[in-house]
């Protein structure tokens, strides 16, 4: 599988007369994967039942939420650390600084090095491939492909590590 991207033109918002520069933007396709789908995938790789895995995942979410709301960070080994941060309104004096100055609370995630994407990885299971959607679309319109495609990844961008 390859991660699809499209080319997006953007101006630097800090420059009034900024020129458009094109950047690859990763595209998320289809529906997001929910806990049920994750549980099913995990079931296929373990001896646990689907219900057991769903229960564990549901309890994990509840336990993480409780720990975060108790002011703790949650460190899941070989995955990453979850913590809370706040968007706040600054005030002039310490006395004026109260919980009313908190505008929103966000959940942060810092991935561990074992899950962080690595563009230079040479291991087959960890190598990230990209699919240029613009090139694929152009290839289909020029070649008259009806969309059946062979799935050969012909629209992939060249590997920068090669």
Image (cartoon, rainbow, N blue to C red):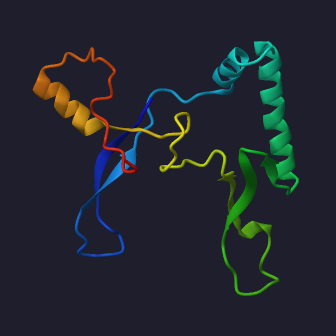
Left or right: 139 with respect to 63?
Answer: left
Q: Residue at x 27, y 18 (%)?
A: 149
Left or right: 74 with respect to 150?
Answer: right
Left or right: 113 with respect to 11?
Answer: right
Dividing the picture into quadrants, the one containing residue 20 is bottom left
Q: How many discs mark residues in the rendered view?
A: 0
Task: Tell me where residue 71 appears, x and y as whole percent.
Answer: 85, 57
Whether 78 is drawn above or below 150: the answer is below
Whether 123 is drawn above or below 117: the answer is above
Task: Tell me where residue 27 appears, x and y as whole percent.
Answer: 41, 39
Whether 139 is drawn above or below 118: the answer is above
Residue closer to the observer: 15 or 48: 48
Residue closer to the observer: 2 or 133: 2
Q: Residue at x 70, y 63 (%)?
A: 86
Q: Residue at x 23, y 75 (%)?
A: 17
Whether 117 is drawn above or below 148: the answer is below
Question: Which residue sits furthest bottom?
Answer: 93
Task: Tell me where residue 22 appears, x and y as whole percent.
Answer: 27, 56
Quadrant location, the N terminus:
top left
Task: Tell me where residue 80 appears, x and y as whole percent.
Answer: 72, 49
């Amino acid at each position: 599988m390859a991660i699809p991207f499209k080319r997006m033109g953007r101006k630097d918002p800090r420059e009034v007369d900024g020129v458009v520069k094109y950047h690859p933007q990763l595209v998320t396709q289809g529906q997001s994967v929910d806990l049920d789908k994750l549980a099913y995938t995990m079931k296929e790789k373990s001896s646990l039942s689907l219900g057991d895995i769903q229960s564990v995942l549901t309890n994990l979410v509840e336990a993480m939420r409780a720990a975060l709301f108790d002011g703790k960070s949650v460190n899941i080994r070989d995955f990453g650390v979850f913590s809370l941060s706040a968007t706040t309104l600054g005030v002039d004096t310490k006395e004026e600084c109260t919980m009313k100055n908190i505008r929103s609370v966000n959940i942060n995630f810092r991935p561990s090095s074992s899950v962080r994407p690595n563009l230079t990885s040479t291991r087959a299971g960890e190598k990230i491939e990209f699919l240029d959607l613009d090139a694929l679309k152009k290839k289909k319109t020029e070649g008259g492909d009806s969309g059946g495609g062979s799935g050969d990844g012909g629209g992939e961008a060249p590997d920068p590590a090669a």
